[in-house]
Image (spheres, grey):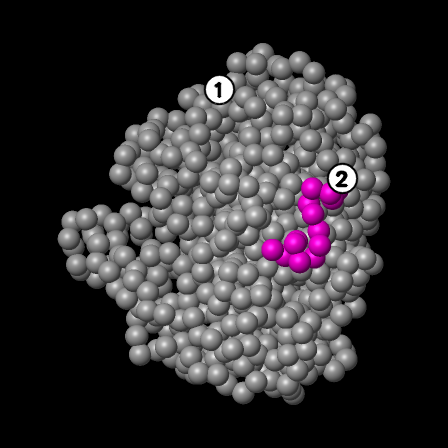
Amino acid sequence: MAAQAAPVAITGLGVIGATGRGVAAMDAALQQGRDGVGPLTLWQSPLDFPVGEYRGPRLEAYLPAPELLPRMSRSDMLALVASHEALQQAGLAAPALSKARAGAYMGQSVCGTLTSEAVYIGAKESAAAGDTGKRSYAGLLVHEGANTLDLMAKTFGLPGPTLNFLTACSSAANAIGLAAEVIRSGRSEVMLAGGADSLSNIVFNGFCSLKVVSPDGPRPFDRQRQGMMVGEGAGVLVLESLAHAKARDANVLALLTGYGHSCDAHHLTAPHPQGRGAIEAMIGALAQAGLGAPDIGYINAHGTATRDNDDVEAKAIAHVFGDRTPVSSTKRFFGHTLAAAGGVEAVVSVRALQLGELPQNLGTQDPEPGIDLVVQPRQTAVTHVLSNSFGFGGNNAALIFSRSE
Amino acid sequence: MMGVIVTGIGVVSSLGANPQAFRRALLAAECPCRPHPFRRLDGSVVTAPAYIAQPADAAGLIEPKKLRRMFRLARMSAVAARQALQQAGLDPAGMDPSKLGVVFGTSMGALEVTQKFVDSWLEQGAQHASPLQFMNSVHGILASQVALDINATGVNLTTAQRDICFEAALDTACSLLEQQRADVIVVGGADELTDLLHECGSRLHQFTLDLAHRGIDPGGRRGAVIPGDGAAVAVLERDDSPRVALARVERTAIGRHDVGDEVVSLAMKSVGTIDLVTTARDGSSRSAVAYKRAQYAVPSVSHLGNFGQYPSAGAQQFAANVLMLHHSEGYAPLVDSRPGPVPDVPKRILHDARSVSGNHAAYVLSRA
């Protein structure tokens, strides 16, 4: 467990997904209770399950460096659009980023597979048809998640460390927690941190193969829930040392105060039945923030709406916090954006602090007992918010965000 | 200066499937590069040079029940992890699992099982995709499989950053130890060369098909490289550990080109006397570009000609560097399968890993 650590400033937010492009669109969706449930339009699938797809105008129109488009996957585009928004809000651009030795840590899992799987499928079909004509394999060059980081470094002029973390659905939360440590260590003054993942055949077919996808969208923590909804998106924060933010008179939106992390070492996909790892991650985050459970005013749950995950998370939350801390999952707004989830939900958590409004646990009609589920938007000023992210392999991460004043 | 020591290493390599065999082959300057048949999507077979890792021998290290659930990459990694823990004298069963962490670097992850998963729905329909293959195809499952095997409930991370995969994992692991998020971290790098990867790499002119090339020439300027695969793992602990240190990690750094140059320059100046630089030069034109600005005041070698090039091959170089320091010996770098000059026995090694994409990582390793 990490010792108590200095808070890190958050000076920019960027988000994109089924709620639309940008924080304002996300705020509106959350306040209006507009879900992200819709049909899959990116490709034809025989599997009839809804997804949380970005359905706004073409991403290409919002790219900060469109000349790099031939080298981009859809995941890359989502990451760049969200990062651009976050940097604009922070008021940071190339010369200042370079001086601050800025870097980027991103959580990813799908990476460029929407592109590379198409190359593979095309090549396989051609081979089966005996087609010996030349095919382009250039799409494979965007397969690696590192492509996103390379594009971010090039687009925004980041000289510092650029790394991705692939811990499935906890990736972005880990990236954010680890990026804060880069700042604390003095290696960089500014870090872009979050996650990005697009939809792809591999993940959509994969989650369907696990029989955990709901036919009508997710209903987290509902006793009648039928499963999750695969989504896509990106959520990015600008993290900055407090000294750097103060020196340039930046608007500090919130503080990142705690990060806890653990591994269940129990099963490849199923969580530990007692939520052992989830509990350790939450307690670890509290310890780093120097807080106790009663200090947390709201928990943004991982809440995928699968039967096992919600059961275990509810137990773990109840174990650490009892039944009086407000909890909601925002997965019905975005779908499960996989590796991006921790980034998207970090943005949700910071907005809850800023607006004094807790987002509702959309889609739930028959709440599980044992936790205080926020079934309607709740106006209440909170000082500290905890966000959970849990992934395959029993990978658990929890972040704590706190008001800046 | 950081207080991190290396207390064990494990290796599954084309040079040998354990640290002892790996060391023997390095001392004997053996070249494991061989013509290898690769099956293409159209059913044809091409034979090309490659450095393929020897089969991982899990006997006595991993329970057969656990082994059955592991695909090749996870198996290599888990075996190397067990070897490293064994050398460190650590029995995971007797440790606080929350203080034991796993950090891995892998560029492509479990590619073989990912392809099998895609084939499962292409050939049988999306309704019949294999859940087992899907869950094993997830990148981070590599570190999770190792954690499952050794019951490590502490930090668990996987990173993929092109040619600095391992170095990035090492940098992350050292930071986590300094933050006291773990007492022991199993840090590794692993990638597998599959038929599909070879087909893609050769069609993109990154892998050579020329059988006249009998090994990598790190200093050469060939357009393509000879690929390899394998896994190497190190056990890292803070230097207050009671266990025997094989080597000491004095500094790690990652950044883009400019920062990287600065890091190397600083390391050369400030971390005592560096007497050997190891690099990830692979002899390709891309590598020549990446190292264009590299200047060292001391001899530099790349051992990629000894064990092959792949994105996380830095893990094998790390193992070789630890062995050089621990046993006070030098290993001749292979140049097109022939041994080059044996470097003087090093006391302090700077490793400088650069990739044409702009990624740059460095570490300084010294005798314990």
- In the rendered view, would you say A142 is above or below B346? above
- In the rendered view, would you say B105 is above or below A273? below
Residue B92 in the magenta stretch? The answer is yes
- Estimate the x, y position of residue B159 in percent, counting from the top left: 57, 54
Front: mark 1 or 2: 2
Which residue, given by chain and number where applicable, does mark 2 sit on? A284
Residue B84 in the magenta stretch? The answer is yes
Task: Identify which residue is drawn at 54% across, 81% down.
Answer: B332
**Residue ranking furthest to the top:** A366
Question: How many tags in the picture?
Answer: 2
Q: Secondary structure at mark 1?
A: loop
- Estimate the x, y position of residue A272 in percent, counting from the top left: 62, 30
Q: Main secondary structure of the magenta part?
A: helix
The disc labelled 1 sits on which kind of residue? Gln
Which residue, given by chain and number where applicable, does mark 1 sit on? A226
Q: Looking at the figure, which quarter contains the C terminus of chain B? A: bottom right
Task: Identify which residue is drawn at 54% across, 74% down.
Answer: B26
Question: For this view, does B140 lie left or right of residue A37?
Answer: right
Q: Are marks 1 and 2 on the same chain?
A: yes
Task: Identify which residue is drawn at 37% across, 56% down.
Answer: B194
Question: For this view, does A69 lie left or right of residue A183?
Answer: left
Q: Secondary structure at mark 2?
A: helix
- In the rendered view, would you say B272 is above or below A296? below
The disc labelled 2 sits on which kind of residue? Gly
